[in-house]
Amino acid sequence: MADLSINFAGIKSPNPFWVASAPPSNTAYQCHRAFEAGWGGVVWKTIGDPILNVSSRYSSHTINGTRMAGFNNIELISDRSIETNFREIKECAEAWPDRAVIASLMTDTRENWHEMMQRAVDSGAAGVELNFGCPHGMCERGMGSAVGQNPDVMETIVDWVMEVAQLPVIVKLTPNITDVTIPARAAKRAGANAISLINTINSITKVDLDRLIPEPYVDGKSAHGGYCGPAVKPIALNMLENCASDPEVNLPISGIGGISNWRDAAEFIALGSGSVQVCTAIMHYGFRIVEDMIEGLSDYLDSKGMHSITELQGKALKTVDRWENLNLNYKRIAAIDYDSCIGCNLCFVACEDGAHQAIALTDAAARGLGPGRLPGKPIPEIKETECVGCNLCSIVCPVDNCITMVDVDTGKDAMSWKNYQEGLNAGTISKIPAHH
Ligand SMILES: Cc1cc2nc3c(=O)[nH]c(=O)nc-3n(C[C@H](O)[C@H](O)[C@H](O)COP(=O)(O)O)c2cc1C
Ligand code: SF4
Ligand code: SF4
């Protein structure tokens, strides 16, 4: 069985699954429950000068009946006292010595950062995470994403923290920025031991069309909030890849954003994460989801002949390249498995109106489908010479593996856009005519 244990920038944990700093990591009670379920680490709900929260706080982006496909909140950092939070961290750290309890911190002045760091050490926390990502409320007070969006300020603050750091320091980054590698590099320059990403994305999930007020509703008003959950996973993976492949960042990365199951976690690890953090999926389904995550990741590593997390870590990174380096002479086309086709023709409509008119409708008998199989239904047929291999039909098809994309041998050597431009300039390649 594969070894799931990790050593993340000096923070040891029996598996890479950490509870993210959020409502599920608010109290010792929840931390005990998380560890009992099997979580390897808990990043405590951000500790700072206690704040006041509003009622209500959350809203959901429901997609085709899938609740919390995207999740939005206008909650601030912990509303419990600094003393209570550190006392409970100490209790959990002592009760679970093989797990990682990480203190998430947010404050303002140099003196206050120094004091918070000392308190974290005294609490027995395994590390600290600096919250420079909260996109509402705290940033209006000059903290959270107000810092994360200003790399120079962030560098100064991380510098203050590193002056006294006796524990591994993880800098949590905001995605509300054009190029995430810029604050990531600032964290590196200031001496941080690791980064984590992403915090939540600025969002308004919906407008109540009766009251004409967005959600979440607070006494006749609303405010923009932070978006997370499955819908943000692609954005998080892209930012992870940006940082993981940047030689100037070169730091361990804790991946966060829409992770709900072992597959999501494996994808984050394959793109360079050393640990993964989960919030929305726990808020939706509870701590026990970690059981399937542990079993699924372990079985996956076994099936790939990998013995540890490090063998998977970053394995997909080298396959992500700039567009200009992709092979223009590679071709794939769609192929339909008529044994599983249900004749819904969604593929035909999508290709006809939304892609390249490369699917024709033919009758089932003409395809050799016997009587009783889709009787009288027109069924799709790929026009192989028209198909540009865009994948759309295979994406819309409701039957798994009914439309697969198959490689076509073009007989041509690989040629990237870059090669093409170089060839044109050198006169060794002639211009390829545009499509009619
Ligand atoms: C209600 C709520 C409160 C949150 N509070 C914090 C916080 O106090 N500190 C912090 O660093 N991140 C906070 N987050 C962000 C999460 O830690 C995490 O970065 C984000 O939700 C993305 O992960 P997910 O898609 O698994 O939810 C909060 C998220 C939610 C939904
Ligand atoms: S891959 Fe694209 S172009 Fe080809 S048949 Fe499907 S939708 Fe049409
Ligand atoms: S979308 Fe899939 S199931 Fe529906 S007609 Fe096309 S191939 Fe068949």
Image (cartoon, rainbow, N blue to C red):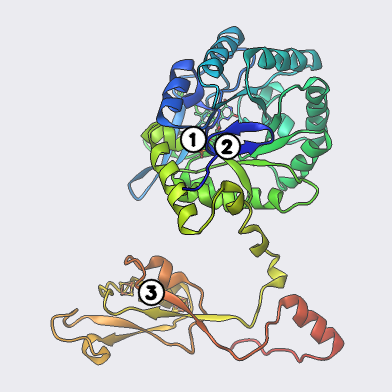
> Disc 2 beta carbon < 8 A from ligand 1?
yes
Q: In the rendered picture of this protein, how many numbered marks are placed on residues?
A: 3
Looking at the picture, tell me which residue is in the foreground, 226 or 199: 199
Quadrant into which the C terminus falls: bottom right
Q: Secondary structure at mark 3?
A: strand
* Three-letter code, disc 2: Thr
Residue at 74 percent across and 89 percent down: it is: 431
Residue 219 makes an appearance in the image: no
Residue at 44 percent across and 27 percent down: it is: 34
> Disc 3 beta carbon < 8 A from ligand 3?
yes
Q: Please say if 393 is above or below 274.
A: below
Residue at 43 percent across and 51 percent down: it is: 299
* Displayed quadrant of residue 142: top right
* Three-letter code, disc 1: Asn
Q: Which residue is mark 3?
A: 403
Q: Which residue is mark 2?
A: 200
Q: Which residue is mark 1?
A: 72
Residue 318 makes an appearance in the image: yes
Asked if the residue under mark 2 is in contact with the one under mark 3, i.e. CB atoms within 8 Å, the reply is no
Cα–Cα span, label 3 and label 2 = 35 Å
Q: Residue furthest left?
A: 372
Q: Earlier in the sequence, mark 3 or mark 1?
A: 1
Specify whether 416 is left or right of 6.
right
